[in-house]
Amino acid sequence: MIVHPVNWDYVYKIPDLEEIESVMFNAVKETNCPNLFLSGGVDSSLALHFLSQCFPLVKCFTLAKTKNHPDYYYATMIASKYPTEHHVYIPSEREITDESQDGDFDGDVGVRLLSKFTLKHVDSVLVTDCIDELDCGYYPHQSELTDENYRKFLKELEKFHLKPLNRNTGNLKIYAPYASKNVIDTFMRIPLADKVNSLERKRHVMALGMKYLPEALVYRRKYGFSSCLKDIKGV
């Protein structure tokens, strides 16, 4: 009989939504960090829901170009539904210009500005990077429904997302629970066809969002963090 590993019959068990939620929740809980970058998208809003189950108060930090920006609208809306201390930073054009550096990736300026602002209040924060790559959250995932395209985003994750995040956040301690091994292993056991199709992206995260979050927020147009300093209006 097989004595090692003890879970040899778990090599390729496709996780159901209950297991996925448990894995994501535990990853967030294990950070023991009650502070959150909150964009008002489904990922950060779901993380807020998880954090609210762990802490009596969650400190949230949002960056937006203006009060008319969708991130301002949705982040303010979801923060009001939980016990939060919500800090919103709308930088001036001068602050944005002064923070810009040669060779910046799209979004680098925003990360630096928000990190410096957050450090005035707390020394650590939770982010939701990696979940878009793991559960097919980008529009190009829909336009090319192939394993090769899926893995392209995963291969670019470190270079274009995690390393810039590490570099631009300075002394702010970053917790990225969805980059943990257990979360990655769980999502890698999910067939690609179950994550995305021509009509839906990020189907598991969206399903969890629909359990706990307003439908309008879950299905808001996705812009990404790099758009927070762009002149986008409306919801």
Image: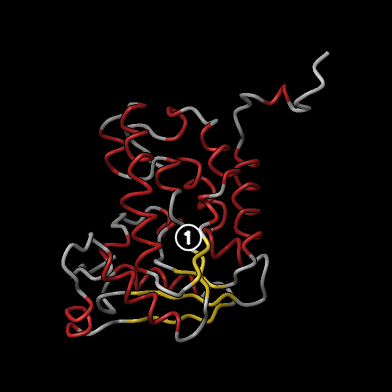
Depth check, front residue: 106 or 24: 106
Residue identified by numbered label 1: 214
Residue located 33% across and 26% down the image? 146
Residue 206 vs residue 101, the one in the foreground: 101
Residue 220 picture location, percent across and down: 35, 56
Q: How many marks?
A: 1
Q: Quadrant of the C terminus?
A: bottom left
Residue at horizontal 49 percent and vertical 75 percent from the top: 60
Horizontal and vertical percent position of residue 7: 74, 28
Q: Quadrant of the N terminus?
A: top right
Mark 1: few/some/many CA within 10 Å (<14, 14-19, 20+): some
Image height of 95 relative to 15, above or below: below
Please say whether residue 149 is visible from this viewpoint. yes
Q: Residue 144, relative to residue 94: is it above or below? A: above
Q: Quadrant of residue 177?
A: bottom right
How far across and down, in percent of the image, does residue 131 sit? 45, 48
**Residue type, label 1:** Pro
Callout 1 secondary element: loop
